[in-house]
Amino acid sequence: MGKKVVTMGEIMLRLSTEGYDRFTQAERFDIVYGGGEANVAVSLANYGFDAHFVSKLPDNPIGQSAVNHLRRYGVATDYIARGGDRIGIYYLETGASMRPSKVVYDRAHSAIAEADLEDFDFDAIFADAEWFHFSGITPAISKKAAVLTEKALIAAKKHGVTVSVDLNYRKKLWTPAEAKEVMTKLMAYVDVCIGNEEDAEKVLGFKPGETDVTKGSLELDGYKTIFKQMKETFDFKYVVTTLRESYSASDNGWSALIYDGNEFYRSKKYDVRIVDRVGGGDSFAGGLIYGLLSSDDFKYALEFAVGASALKHTIKGDANHVTADEVETLINGDASGRVQR
Amino acid sequence: MGKKVVTMGEIMLRLSTEGYDRFTQAERFDIVYGGGEANVAVSLANYGFDAHFVSKLPDNPIGQSAVNHLRRYGVATDYIARGGDRIGIYYLETGASMRPSKVVYDRAHSAIAEADLEDFDFDAIFADAEWFHFSGITPAISKKAAVLTEKALIAAKKHGVTVSVDLNYRKKLWTPAEAKEVMTKLMAYVDVCIGNEEDAEKVLGFKPGETDVTKGSLELDGYKTIFKQMKETFDFKYVVTTLRESYSASDNGWSALIYDGNEFYRSKKYDVRIVDRVGGGDSFAGGLIYGLLSSDDFKYALEFAVGASALKHTIKGDANHVTADEVETLINGDASGRVQR
Amino acid sequence: MGKKVVTMGEIMLRLSTEGYDRFTQAERFDIVYGGGEANVAVSLANYGFDAHFVSKLPDNPIGQSAVNHLRRYGVATDYIARGGDRIGIYYLETGASMRPSKVVYDRAHSAIAEADLEDFDFDAIFADAEWFHFSGITPAISKKAAVLTEKALIAAKKHGVTVSVDLNYRKKLWTPAEAKEVMTKLMAYVDVCIGNEEDAEKVLGFKPGETDVTKGSLELDGYKTIFKQMKETFDFKYVVTTLRESYSASDNGWSALIYDGNEFYRSKKYDVRIVDRVGGGDSFAGGLIYGLLSSDDFKYALEFAVGASALKHTIKGDANHVTADEVETLINGDASGRVQR
Amino acid sequence: MGKKVVTMGEIMLRLSTEGYDRFTQAERFDIVYGGGEANVAVSLANYGFDAHFVSKLPDNPIGQSAVNHLRRYGVATDYIARGGDRIGIYYLETGASMRPSKVVYDRAHSAIAEADLEDFDFDAIFADAEWFHFSGITPAISKKAAVLTEKALIAAKKHGVTVSVDLNYRKKLWTPAEAKEVMTKLMAYVDVCIGNEEDAEKVLGFKPGETDVTKGSLELDGYKTIFKQMKETFDFKYVVTTLRESYSASDNGWSALIYDGNEFYRSKKYDVRIVDRVGGGDSFAGGLIYGLLSSDDFKYALEFAVGASALKHTIKGDANHVTADEVETLINGDASGRVQR
Amino acid sequence: MGKKVVTMGEIMLRLSTEGYDRFTQAERFDIVYGGGEANVAVSLANYGFDAHFVSKLPDNPIGQSAVNHLRRYGVATDYIARGGDRIGIYYLETGASMRPSKVVYDRAHSAIAEADLEDFDFDAIFADAEWFHFSGITPAISKKAAVLTEKALIAAKKHGVTVSVDLNYRKKLWTPAEAKEVMTKLMAYVDVCIGNEEDAEKVLGFKPGETDVTKGSLELDGYKTIFKQMKETFDFKYVVTTLRESYSASDNGWSALIYDGNEFYRSKKYDVRIVDRVGGGDSFAGGLIYGLLSSDDFKYALEFAVGASALKHTIKGDANHVTADEVETLINGDASGRVQR
Amino acid sequence: MGKKVVTMGEIMLRLSTEGYDRFTQAERFDIVYGGGEANVAVSLANYGFDAHFVSKLPDNPIGQSAVNHLRRYGVATDYIARGGDRIGIYYLETGASMRPSKVVYDRAHSAIAEADLEDFDFDAIFADAEWFHFSGITPAISKKAAVLTEKALIAAKKHGVTVSVDLNYRKKLWTPAEAKEVMTKLMAYVDVCIGNEEDAEKVLGFKPGETDVTKGSLELDGYKTIFKQMKETFDFKYVVTTLRESYSASDNGWSALIYDGNEFYRSKKYDVRIVDRVGGGDSFAGGLIYGLLSSDDFKYALEFAVGASALKHTIKGDANHVTADEVETLINGDASGRVQR
């Protein structure tokens, strides 16, 4: 059993149409269970860590199915409280070419959004843990969840756990002002900060350059300016962002940038033919944590994270079902896609 | 285009597992949209009426899919307001033999539960209408919905519309005390009352006999006592109940009883091999309204209703997809199931 | 390779809804290819005969798929002419309980209905053949097909081939008067005649007793009267009928009656839980031909035919996918349905 | 309810194999109902018009399912006559890369091909209508349908309705000589004419330049010559064509050209990764009608039409399930395919 | 976390056809992973025990999928060794009515059949365990597996663990003589012995009465004679058998008999409409172990086991997905199958 | 019926996940039956030859299903012996973009691997045959199979049959040393040798140039050197290789090279968007044999082979379901993918 790692957040029921069907054509939904931090936990379990997911799920068969989904992929579910009214839902239709994928959220009033501090024993949760990961979604889902997140961070730090965050601004959940108020406070506990320009601006107030995320272009200089400010303000160990170039819903460019206070390192770029891009960012975070926990080389960690998440784009569902060996093969140069017999 | 008939209530997204799969086995959900009064509307559209459904649905593609589902089956959707946060959901797994079907509700905070009076123009809705049907579920979903129901009933009566109710007590939505307070008041507007013993007791406070609904037995005498009280108290034109004998989740006996103040008439009984029993009661109500609107013979109406709803048990989904001709063939004696070429 | 047997008729594309879905619910059709005589050919191939099917199919990929379907199940397709406009189609929804299965035909203008004599070389077809089977459907589909059938029968008799017919009256294809005119003439070539009371009356004009085929009852005496007349009039070697008791679309009683001029023999009766009853009669004919070709005991042949066709009712599709061994096991007494490991 | 628009033609049952399966591999067909003018009607209903489809369908459950399909997507079906023998069918397998999609038609003898004038009340149909659209397929399916089309056009003009045509030459239905004889006469009623070079030559006899439609190249000058002739001969208000560059069955270039008598305007070009290209031209016509009815700017109308039909290529089925908002977003510049949350 | 219980054996990939399709009709296989002892482990996990499964699986993604299947349903997989050549397979087609279900095995050379003693640390496995269950299949799959089983039993006894066996004679794996030689020796370690007459005779040599397992009848007296001999010979604490009455592949009677040395107790009998009867006996064993571990009342344990396994017959797959509460509801009398809302 | 052609080898059950699902996500496997030489036989049957496949399959319904699969696609199965323990299996997950497809083999102990000489009558098999094709897989599966292959080759030569081989090195089946020992001997019987650089080196010991098959580059000069050596050593009539440029799992370049002793001819190159690349090489061999049997022009044969196999990449399954006409259309220049109506 590998090192103990912990993620905390919401896991939702994802209902996706078949193939490229639009919602109004659907007669069936495919089911997976996912959410930012849950997806990271699955990645970490795949890489051999003792990955724990902290959340709350209703005590009914749908909640149980979410637990089972995590167990199936090796995530420890002992820290998931049971109770509350409902599991959050998101509906997904998969785009193609110039038609974007579309997500409809129905996540209000979920069990984790209304969870209480008593639902969790953070001392037990963080005992012997080495890493804690959360995203900007968790404190956004409710006031109670924001408090919960801070308590978790305090406990994590008390136990000497390294902390990473994926800023992940969600405009349906809160305004930039609300985000800034809550998140600025939480940054004090964070060692590794992942976020793109939009996140940096909306969540932390750092002005990006002139990158227009609906364009395919990338403005590396803008990132460098922001990363320096972030590093200075919050003393992060690493500031990291993925760099997505959205050519279309079917094809994206995919790379990443990391800053350790000294050096900006940009990864190799992959052109990916997309099967399912939901969870791409989460698989990146999972890969980065793996890399930083397994090696002292932050450039290797970044390449691993980018390779892992490039592969995620070829896999249906929220979670990334690849082994560390498969990622290594890719980042060591075999992107030929030849059949492996 | 036939007579104008109106039903009002909630339509939900129904997510059912494939075949007899349990929730924890499911990788896919089949989608239909249904709810008591929506199901009645589909039945009435099938029988050639100009059937209108009154409700509120979110202005997103899932709400639109519910609208489309009704349109597909011929229900007029012009009176459906659009807006609100979400569509209610229910999850269904289909039982077999001694394993019961199981329903998990996730319907709180639905658009119709939080709809406002301004969402509906009841004068337009009931203009030229001949029948209005609602169930005890609608006023139970929220205080606002209870008020809405009463306003609808007042308008219906103003326009001289005949009113039917299916009492349909739902213990997850309210207590007997709450039900009694709201429903007793609404009964003043009702001409035709459908409800079994449990409903009569929980919703209106009439003591049933000793029928135990988990047993296969039927206690006709108990019904007669109650029906007389109901008739006297509320001056219903007809009091009606279905009589389900649950031999198992796979096989049921199915008949009904009607009382017109003079006579108790019990229908023919069918033994049904069940494909999908959800919506059985709604298809009964639909058949009864058809019968009473098409004929003066309440016994014929009851036989039509029972035949129609027996057929519903053989059809997947909430709604009853049969024509009046098909029901007539059955109640006129051909239950042989021979292939129709 | 076993004895050469030949059947001739129409093979159609069968489009059936999934499970018990009604046509108006369908989003998908399951595909098989079938038709009375084609189904008999599949049965005979399963039993080890060198079974040939004679027909005509359009020279397009749908026609090819029908050919492939027959090849898959071991039927020789060399005598199938290619050309014409279309393959006939029938749509099927499967009933349950008191709801009957429903068939919608779209078979006019099919390639076989418009086939010419030159499409077939009957001398080659019947060379070395031991049995020829056709049904009353083939001459009914068109005037040309009726002529074709007679030419085939003449050639068969020239080659000393035993001939069986399944009368199979189809009211959508012709009137009793038309049927009688054509079929009476063809009976001169027939050795084994299969048909129930309705067929006997509609096709050959023999008055049945008072059996009402929509009832579950059976009127054996009526059959005996008719069979004697049929034997006398046409000098059939055997007159045979299946005896279906339609309790419902889900459950039937199934047995048969044979008359050899001396003795009436009624088979064992099976109560069958139905998976797919289309092709039940065809599998009976297939079983009977097997029995009569493999043994001198017509009672054994009848029991084999009834057992084979009882099994067919448990198999989806038009054709009967059972081996002779499986039929033997059943008719020798093991109807327990215990798992065979 | 928006402006009343009317389309008339054949709606067929489309049976398509799953994924990229060839016909000979298929065990299941996916079902949609579509046809040129029906597809235009669905587009127009999506954009908020009161869209009516005029046709005839058999009075059986398959015909009803076609009606239901249209209702589901908001098309008014009151002008669809019921009766006749059958619904036309087309089989579809979807190509990929260098393997083309393949269509097998089985549409002869359909209800609309054999419909009578008495089946339609054109005065009622065109009362208050603002637009009528038909294609060159409708008059091609039968002599009776050609007469019907002319009668419809006369009535449309009597009611002051704007008329558009999509020339759509189908070599399986008629010869160029036959097409020219019928279509030339009908052009007198047409305001907006859509057709590519092949159509212009085969249907109206205008010589195209040297464009070879099996090549990827485009010969704009040839179009200009032809468009001028068409405009002069028939006094069309607009002459329009789509410009498809078939790189392969998986990837196409897609743009369009319009001529108003003064100016040739070529739209933006999209490179589309194809999900389903059937109905691409119909979605273009639907978009163009929307554009011309909603704005005075024919260039905007063309861009809308091209954007709408580019999106159609990403959607399974014959019809285009997009809203006007979605098209606007695309033509205003966001083709990035980023997930919309 | 509940009491630690351990089962050991083979888990196979089960490939089953859809619905009632025969093997020769199949285009798809449904996948589950199951085997006698694995199925028992899933039952025990469902009832809240800390259930461990001991086996060996190949170190490839198919082996991993089997591990994941167990994890999904809560079984601890830490004691599963990884390596070897292959996972055993069994193919299943589901019978109906008089057509039996059919199993084709392809299990030779599986990882567990060729596992070594070094693959398992039995001291760790049985530390703190309270129950160990195995079946007669495990020692039958190979000589090495027979040795392994004995070593496991020795270790279990050393740790004071209660042992149960399900005799489960498999004629494809060994002869009665081979079975007797191996199994007789192993019975010394067994406390609770489950086996029907055929098992008792083939595995242990006790002559059954005249029960013919292909008949529906039951010969209780024969069982009593045998049970007494078994108890005397091996000093079992309990001797138990299920009593299956195979009316057909669709309907069975289901009950059980237990003997504690003093008293024969026969359970309530259920008539079950079968969805999937594979694993019925395993779910019985799981229920019995639950009952005996949770209560001192062996009659209650038997009723629980019978109720649990009756429910299993309504659930697809090898494993029994029911909670203890659901079983209690059934055995306390509610077999009505009414919808649970 | 065309010329008699024979192929010999193993046919396996292929179990593939749906879409791009990874093995650990699969709940269902799609079923086809395939293997190198069986795939070639299907190609040859499609092109109108009397194609025979020689192998051995277990006498159970799974073996029968493999036989049926071949029959469906027109391959004669009379030379398939029945018996043995099992059919070989391979599991397939389909890759996308930079994620490779993955094959897991479970083929040891298959019926053909353990077949005896007595299972086949090679004199009958090769009587009147014109071509025999085998691959380097067949002699690799077992020592017995290697002997069998040699006996087949001797018989083929005795009957004057032309022989082709696809070297197809499989590192899971044997080492280069083992391959060389067996294959060198067999080359004496071969007329046409197909193999890429890796095969040439591993199987025959010819040193390739510096082509790295995981790169997209191609090293034509290396091939030329090797081909000359091969020609000289074994006096092949033709030496041939496909040239795959693996840009990714989704897109490949595809062409081929042939050497007749005089001239090196490289075919046109296709860029293929991949649906299923398994069997690509087999479809090439099938096309090449067709070309060489139908024409004296080896360049045409190569173009046909490359066009045929390019099309195969767009078709799901192991086998190539295209007609010679479809290949001709492609190689004559229409790669536009326009819909064929």
Image (spheres, coloured by chain):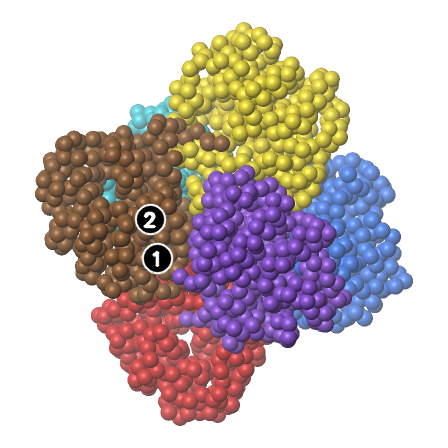
Chain colours: A blue, B cyan, C brown, D red, E yellow, F purple
Dot 1: element: loop
- The amino acid at mark 2 is Ala
- Residue occupied by mark 2: C51
Residue E149 x/y as whole percent? 67, 24
Residue A110 in view: no
To which quarter of the image does residue F288 belong? Answer: bottom right
Dot 2: element: strand
Name the N-terminal-most of marks 1 and 2.
2
Q: Residues within 10 Å of mark 2 (few under 14, many from 20)?
A: many
Instruction: Tell me, yes or no, whether the two marked residues, 1 and 2, touch with CB atoms within 8 Å.
Output: no
Q: Which of E225 and A192 is in front in this view?
A: E225
Identified at 44% across, 53% down, the residue is F76
Judge from the rendering whether residue F313 lies leftward or rightward of residue E255; answer left or right.
right
Q: Which quadrant of the rendered structure holds the N terminus of chain A?
A: top right
Extreme residue toward the right, this view: A262
Identified at 72% across, 72% down, the residue is F221
Q: Which of D280 and A162 is in front in this view?
A: D280
* CA gap, disc 1 and disc 2: 11 Å
Residue F233 x/y as whole percent? 68, 64
- Residue occupied by mark 1: C78
Residue E311 x/y as whole percent? 49, 29
- The amino acid at mark 1 is Asp
Q: Nearer the viewer, residue F311 or C186?
A: C186
